[in-house]
Image: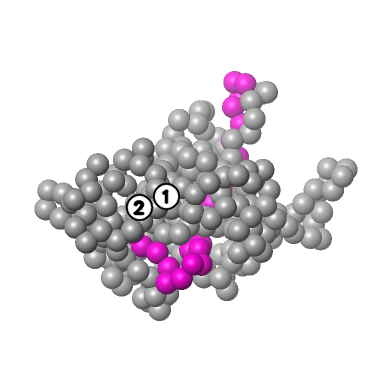
Amino acid sequence: MCGRYAVSKDPATLAAEFDAVDATEQPERGPDYNVAPTKQVVAVVQRHPRGADGEVDQDTTERSLRIMKWGLVPHWAKDASGGAKMINARSESAADKPAFKKSLATRRCLLPADGWYEWRRDGAAKQPFFTTGPDDSSLAMAGLWTTWRDKADPDAPVLITCAVLTTAAVGPLADVHDRMPLLMPREHWAGWLDPDRSEVSELLAPPSEELVGALEIRPVSQLVNSVRNNSAELTRRADDPGLFRA
């Protein structure tokens, strides 16, 4: 976990919800009900802005929505091919891993989601489930991000990538999978995104049972198994999911 999730809101709506500036430059970005590794995703960051002279303004910060590629590529990687294998970072060990240590200290983000998918093995089959909030509010998955430059092509654009932090599953979620995304409650957003805060160990604890207890865990169609399928139908409860196999 987490290997797939859904985002139905457009950047303008997400910017308002997260009190951020929309810097995605993708106003027409449509819903994605089957977000998969290596896709371009919307992330919330908070950084010190640069003035007209290019200097960083250390006295102010700006929260904004940015586009990143899901699958973190460390700045020291020789190429970007390994990003697909680094979509998640374990919250318990991220501070000790070379690929994630610097990002945890200086480059944290939130990844908005309607909810996420997870698969539970039922005999020889795997049943997909969708976990979502109790209302229309987005879930905020804690994430890490970084930049990578292709040393073989200095003119190539900078690649911005991210990973979802995961933690031990809480309460009924453990019946589906032993891991879950590290959900960040609204009261922790400011502290998590603060670019001047490097020590965040207290924010890495699994979400409360109260938060998890308010979530809905529903079986869904196996259409989600294929990244080619992408519609709201994927997130709907399927009383007999086997009827909808791709």
Q: Amino acid at mark 1?
A: Tyr
Residue 138 on the magenta segment: yes
The boundaries of the magenta stretch are 129-153
x and y percentages locating residue 87 in the rendered image: 43, 45
Q: Residue at horizontal 64%, vertical 30%?
A: 157
Q: Residue at x 82, y 54 (%)?
A: 57
The secondary element bearing badge 2 is classed as helix
Residue lying furthest top: 152
Residue 55 percent coordinates (x, y):
83, 46
Q: Kindly identify which residue carries mark 1.
A: 33
Residue 154 image label: none
The C terminus: image quadrant: top left
Q: In the image, is 62 to the left or to the right of 233? A: right
Q: How many marks?
A: 2
* Residue behind mark 2: 233
Q: Is residue 146 above or below residue 2?
A: above
Q: Would residue 83 be counted in the magenta stretch?
A: no
Residue 104 in view of the camera: no
Q: Is residue 135 above or below residue 12?
A: below
Residue located farthest toward the bottom when viewing the structure as drawn: 210
User: Residue at 29% across / 46% down in the picture?
Assistant: 223
Mark positioned earlier in the residue sequence (1 or 2): 1
Indicate the position of residue 76 as horizontal and vertical percent values.
Answer: 55, 35
Question: Outermost residue, right direction?
Answer: 53
Circle 1: is it few (<14), some (14-19), or many (20+) Cα within 10 Å? many
Q: Nearer the viewer, residue 160 or 95?
A: 160
Q: Are marks 1 and 2 in contact (CB under 8 Å)?
A: yes
Front residue of this view, candidates 48 and 212? 212
Q: Residue 120: give x, y in percent of width and height.
A: 23, 56
